[in-house]
Image (tube, rainbow, N blue to C red):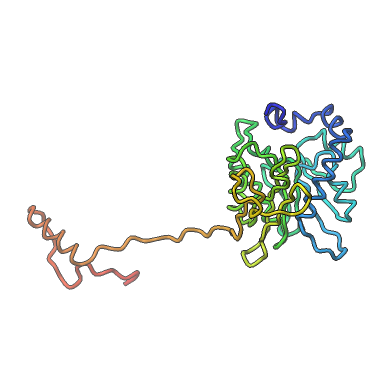
Amino acid sequence: MSSRPELQAPPEIFYDDSEARKYTSSSRIIKIQSELTERALELLALPDDGVPRLLLDIGCGSGLSGETLTENGHEWIGLDISDSMLNVALEREVEGDVILGDMGQGLGFRSGVIDGAISISAIQWLCNADKSSHEPRLRLKAFFGSLYKCLARGARAVFQVYPENIDQRVLILSYAMRAGFAGGVVVDFPHSGKKRKEYLVLTCGPPSINTSVPKGKGEDGESCSEDDDSSGDEENQTQVCVSDRHRPRKKQRTTKKGKGREWILKKKEQMRRRGNAVPADTKYTARKRKARF
């Protein structure tokens, strides 16, 4: 586990000038980034009408995934917290617009302007408290809440993630559901140690919109479902579906039922027995007073 970057240092420190150039010049990483981005685009299920979409690349780094978006004919905006990574992206003259920002503080885009969002190996960083002011739950809440607002209704967000454990996966998914998203987790190659990849596939919109979760890929490259191996445990499930969730409604205020006439008369009688001065009972006793006279 010590090889996980998010356990070594905050992203803006880990990806310094040296690491950013090393990362971007690796042919192996370039190939992996391209494959993961192609799969994320497939799971986005954008309309095949030839119209370019405006996509958001969260944790864009040096723009490797953005190049794949450009090759597929889309416009994109990249967000990353590492200044060194973005400097490399500018040197490489990527086609998209890049922004220096912390996704844990929310996304500052107008409502409904983004047609889809992807993220490659970035969302799990939100689960770490890199500073004394960082609270992972609050950061997840701010991120998913702002993402829901800026996405067009019916748009999808696909995040390739490397959760450290099941609890971390559940934490991320639960805050996505609280923000109003529907969807679940798609796992490609669930029985492979090296090829296994997890994607959080979320749909923005009311339950009336189709929020079914795509199937993951099996060892033969074909899609497979949970029914293919019903004896597997949770770790070997191809997809974990939590669909048709929507923004929770505010709790209705409840008022306690007022005391009745019999209860008040009983209490007044008890007060008289104790020798207290109690007003006489009339037809107005226990009658609710009007708002104004």
Rendering coords of residue 126 (x, y %) = 66, 39
Name the residue rendered at 75%, 32% in the picture. 12
Please say if 82 is above or below 185. above
Quarter of the image for the C terminus: give it: bottom left
Rendering coords of residue 201 (x, y %) = 69, 53
Q: Is residue 278 left or right of residue 146?
A: left
Residue 81 or residue 283, whichever sits in front: 81
Name the residue rendered at 72%, 51% in the picture. 216
Residue 5 or residue 283, whichever sits in front: 5
Please say if 241 is above or below 127. below
Which image quadrant is residue 33 in? top right
Q: Is residue 44 left or right of residue 95?
A: left
Q: Total marks drawn?
A: 0
Which image quadrant is residue 10 in? top right
Rendering coords of residue 60 (x, y %) = 80, 42
Rendering coords of residue 220 (x, y %) = 78, 49
Which image quadrant is residue 280 in? bottom left
Name the residue rendered at 15%, 64% in the picture. 265
Please say if 137 is above or below 256. above
Quarter of the image for the N terminus: give it: top right
